[in-house]
Image: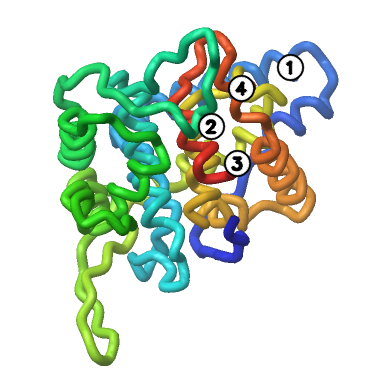
Amino acid sequence: MSTLVQRSTGLVQRRNVASSGAEGGGSESRDDVEKVRKNEEEEDDHDSKEARLTLMEEVLLLGLKDREGYTSFWNDCISSGLRGCILIELALRGRIQLEQTGMRRRSLGTRKVIYKSDTPTGDVLLDEALKHIKETNPPENVQSWIEYLSGETWNPLKLKYQLRNVRERLAKNLVEKGVCSTEKQNFLLFDMTTHPLTDSVIKQKLIKRVQDSVLSRWTNDPQRMDKRVLSLIYLAHSSDVLENAFAPLSDDDYEVAMKRVRDLLDLDFEKESMNEGTNELMWAVISAFTK
């Protein structure tokens, strides 16, 4: 597992609403905290509907340097991480699932991915991946699909499944949604298209949601966490960009946040996938990246 080493500038400092309310101790303080939390949740919902960012766009946005508009040259994890995001996004939208298991339960890694619905998502990358999954017979497991979609396979017959230029295509989506812009940067021997941040509010909201999920809104139970936020934490970690969300925190909050992330990484994913109402494919992807 890759070590978190990246740092970024221009990130939002987490507001300690819960702790300040707890210090008051009175019922009015608790009510005020609850109102603030509800307002923040409503704002987050409004922002997510307004921006309509997919899970892979959120992971890429965490990885993009605000001013420079590109991800770290040393990050070799984000490519496969974004493919994992695509699988989870399709699962959360009800398009794919893990094959059913019989009386003899099999591990997440051995179960195949099957399409559940071929209704278009409206996202070109998602629909492209869904088409590949639907047309593949016999079906493949999660680990295989991550490799196929990344082009990291030794089987030449599977190279047709590779999703090409994913980062650039996602960055263009962010441009179309008004989050980033497009510029050309000269790097001595070559020119590179970059996508500097233009809407800092959306990124700040994203970072705050990640911070709060392991601080003020921590539940100590992954089954009570929002599936999308939980997936974002795992995939951002696997893509080596989670550190960017935690960099602005105080030392104490940073230590707490990282401890809780480690707690999530140490979970028994097979056991978590057996809980009622969970998404098995989500846990299969998480398991593939953290095993």
Residue 212 seen: yes
Nearer to us: label 4 or label 3: 4
Percent position of residue 10, x then y: 49, 60
Q: Give the mark nearest the N terminus, 3 or 2.
A: 3
Nearer to us: label 1 or label 2: 2
In this orientation, which residue lies closer to the viewer: 134 or 165?
134
Q: Give the mark nearest the N terminus, 1 or 2.
A: 1
Label 3–label 2 contact, CB within 8 A: no
Label 1–label 4 contact, CB within 8 A: no
In this orientation, which residue lies closer to the viewer: 217 or 166?
166
Residue bearing the label numbered 3: 211
Dot 4: what SS?
helix
Residue bearing the label numbered 2: 230
Label 1–label 2 contact, CB within 8 A: no
Dot 3: what SS?
helix
Image-quadrant location for residue 15? top right
Q: Give the mark nearest the N terminus, 1 or 4.
A: 1
Percent position of residue 160, x then y: 16, 50
Label 1–label 3 contact, CB within 8 A: no
Query: In the displayed structure, would residue 52 be above or below residue 279?
Result: below
Residue bearing the label numbered 4: 272
The residue lying at 28 percent from left, 48 percent from top is 149
Q: Amino acid at mark 2?
A: Leu
Q: Residues within 10 Å of mark 1 (few under 14, many from 20)?
A: some
Percent position of residue 193, x then y: 21, 70
Residue bearing the label numbered 1: 30
Q: Give the mark nearest the N terminus, 4 or 3.
A: 3
Nearer to us: label 1 or label 3: 3
Using the image, tell me which numbered label, if any, was put on residue 255.
none
Residue 123 seen: no
Q: Amino acid at mark 3?
A: Gln
Q: Give the mark nearest the N terminus, 2 or 4.
A: 2
